[in-house]
Image (cartoon, rainbow, N blue to C red):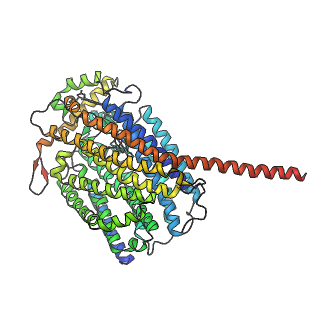
Amino acid sequence: MEPLNNKQLTTPKLFMIAGLLLLAVGLLFGFTGALQYLVPGFLKQYLSFEKIRPLHVSSIVFWIIFGTIGAVLTYLSQHSGRKIYSPLLTKIQLIIFILSIIVIFISYCVGIFGGREYWEFHPLLALPIAAGWVLFLINFIKSVGSFKKQPVYVWMWLTGIVFFLFTFLESYLWIFPYFRNNVVNDMTVQWKSYGSMVGSWNMLIYGSSIFLMEKISGNKPFSYSVIAFALYFTGLFNLMFNWGHHIYTLPTYNFIQYISYVVSMTELFIFGRIILQWKSSVSIARKHFHHTAYRFLIAADVWIFLTLLLAIAMSVPAINVYTHGTHITVAHTMGATIGINSFLLLAFAFDILHDTCLPFTLYKKWFNRGYWITNLSLFIFWISLIGAGILKAKWQMSAAKIPFSTMMLQLRPFFIVFFISGTVMMAGFILILYPLLKNQFICYLKNILKKRKIKEQHVSGIFAMD
Amino acid sequence: MASDKQKIIVVALLVVTFLFYSFYLYSSLPVKDYTINEESGKGKLVWQQYNCNACHQVYGLGGYLGPDLTNVYSFRGKEYIKAFLNIGTATMPNFHLNNQEINALLAFLNSIDASGKSDPRSFTIKYDGTIKQ
Ligand code: HEM
């Protein structure tokens, strides 16, 4: 069921809009970081790479989190046909998050870091984020009401919200010396938490994408089917136990390697299903391709395929020992966060935000171009990172190593392609973001003017009566 | 369609196993030697304070603009590292660290060096796809 007033600027929509702005900012930092790869010492005095990297990664992670919250809250009320339990809590959460992000960004700029890998900030700033998340959890549980006979996406949302909180808190265990005193212990716990945290936000995003897919295609039974739940359980199993593939080379417990290796291979089940479904996916895709939101779902499907292929390969320790510590890891991370997470979130953004006071058809061309440009350039971007990674892997394994700086010089052609394709991709994203955000802004202003006019008319009416 | 009860049983089993795994790891961390080296503990915090991790890796994890530093201590030696920290490079800023910070960092780099080897060449690959050092 659609909420009554689609055009109103609700808090979940504001989450999505703030998320899109964070994406734009994140792209700019990514661009700067890539430039620093090419021009050693670029902005070294003011915004050296140790500042740019967390600025980039944090903006991007916050884009994912904001977009996800916006989507889950919107879709939850569409699913239940009721309003969110407490719009006030949502508003408070938004304000807490925005203020925290502003402080986090300032802290990076003045050189205050958490110093951890990779989504990191001062531990004090984790407190408001955790508190805001608790509000989200309360709001979610209260809004769902009864958990009986719910479709798979409601299960996924609840799982994602709970596990995000758990893993987020877990990632701060290092503040206790017991956990951080030994580097091996510290890294074991850190990657346990981060590995599962990514799984948690994926639960939220994949859940939302199942909801949206069904909303567009009108095919409800899937989200209640056995296969949907089987996929959900496989995802949850991996979220909980596959994190060890980040630390195969760490001298930690051997069983962490074995468990993670075996568990990761269950992803082949998801992979197999994608292949089996290929034909029907393509025919459904043809039918809905005109639908902009759906198009991003399809792009994400292709990227899920590519990313999963790489991820499963990297989960085999014997392959991981080569790829680990190289830009293949970056290819994997950015491929997943852009190709899967960001594209799915853009599908939600379009679905949630396109209904404004201005017709969206005006921008069809922008979207079309943006869509193809981001996808093609992402592919080149991804390949260039894999290329750089392969060369570095060879270097890592070579008997007589040339110096690190000489090796990096040899990778330069790949970094140039990385930079150019990244810049083009950024332009592609802007073609998509600009109309989405501009429409919101114009309609917001129009709305204010309209309200003011009504007020003025009202006031002059009173005077006329005098 | 599976019933709610069946689904809850599956999720509950997974959650219980997950919690058991988590708390087992917390209570029995892989390295049991808890002797605290104060200097390297301080060095770790200096490492975090300057975000060395954004450009360097430890055990292959971190940012990728600079080299992995897991075994730099034994590979390069104290003086070499000191020189890098005092001067910086084209990419790496000179953080103007004081002597205390440098000594703490050296102790930290020494401790991670002693914890193991990150060099992928030191692993043997087994037929089942696992690796061993
Ligand atoms: C939606 C867009 C993007 C997302 C979601 C994204 C996400 C990420 C993530 C998660 C990382 C951490 C990688 C890791 O540690 O394995 C990262 C690193 C990085 N990204 Fe992006 N990124 C995006 C766009 C870009 C663009 C357009 C550029 C360049 C033009 C860029 C340049 C970089 C650089 C230079 C790094 C650091 C690599 C290193 O550690 O050495 N990113 N990005």
Q: Count of labels shown?
A: 0
Residue at left 31%, top 70%?
A: A230
Q: In x, y percent, where is residue B73?
A: 19, 31
Vertical placement of residue B127 versus A445, above or below:
below
Q: Where does residue A106 sit, x and y in percent of width and height?
A: 47, 35
Q: Quadrant of the N terminus of chain B?
A: bottom left
Q: Position of residue A26 (x, y in %)?
A: 42, 41
The answer to whether residue A175 is above or below residue B13 is above
- Front residue (pair A66, B18): A66
The picture quadrant where one finds residue A55 is: top left
**Can I make out residue A445 in this image?**
yes
Q: Residue at x 11, y 37 (%)?
A: A398
Position of A151 compared to B40: left or right?
A: right
Which of A310 and A166 lies nearest the eye of the viewer? A310
Q: Is residue A325 visible?
A: no
Q: Is residue B114 left or right of residue A286?
A: left
Left or right: A312 in relation to B129: right
**Which corner quadrant of the image does residue A218 belong to?**
bottom left
Q: Position of residue B40 (x, y in %)?
A: 27, 35
Q: In the image shown, does B59 or A447 lie closer to the viewer?
A: A447
